[in-house]
Amino acid sequence: MTYDPNNVFAKILRGEIPCNKVLETEHSLAFHDINPLCRHHVLVIPKGSYVSLDDFSARSSEAEIVDLIRSLGEVARMLGVDASGYRIMSNHGHDARQEVPHLHFHGCGGEDLGPMLRLPK
Ligand code: 5GP
């Protein structure tokens, strides 16, 4: 899949639309989800142009991977959910219903998140 530079997270990275920033590093940006599904719902994204985890895992540098993973942990500690627990998710493609075609990890916490997955009936 070709990267679409007009996706909403590309616009956030270019500063064309605002976000509620939590953390910015050399290769990553973390900000609050506009439509939170739990008490703390943060999106952590690479600054590079990657469609999804499939793309990122194939093309990214080790520095970008390390930065993104460290950012996920750092955001959780910043939000104070490292002790209580949290869930990290990333949707890739159709079956996962990925909406925004720029890799993002959902970091969710701050309350009991229930079972990991509930399939639609
Ligand atoms: P996906 O379904 O692609 O895994 O999740 C996309 C997420 O991006 C959704 O949780 C949605 O609420 C969030 N989102 C979509 N547009 C915006 C936006 O303009 N700003 C922020 N902060 N989040 C957005």
Image: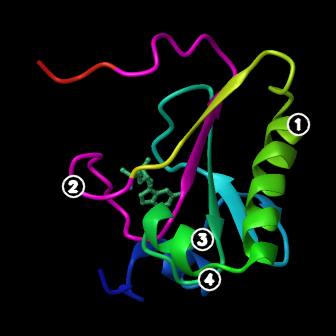
- Numbered circle sitting on residue 77: 1
**Which numbered disc flags the more N-terminal residue, 2 or 3?**
3
**Which numbered disc flags the more N-terminal residue, 4 or 1?**
4
Q: On the image, numbered disc 3 is attached to which residue?
A: 18
- Numbered circle sitting on residue 48: 4
Residue 25 x %, y %: 84, 71
Q: Is residue 5 left or right of residue 22?
A: left
Q: Mark 4 near ligand 1 (CB under 8 Å)? A: no
The answer to whether 105 is drawn above or below residue 12 in the figure is: above
Q: Is residue 108 left or right of residue 101?
A: right
Q: Amino acid type of disc 2?
A: His
Magenta residues span 92-117
Q: Amino acid type of disc 1?
A: Arg
Q: Is residue 108 part of the magenta span, yes or no?
A: yes
Q: Are marks 3 and 4 in contact (CB under 8 Å)?
A: no
> SS of the residue at dot 1?
helix
Residue 105 x %, y %: 57, 51
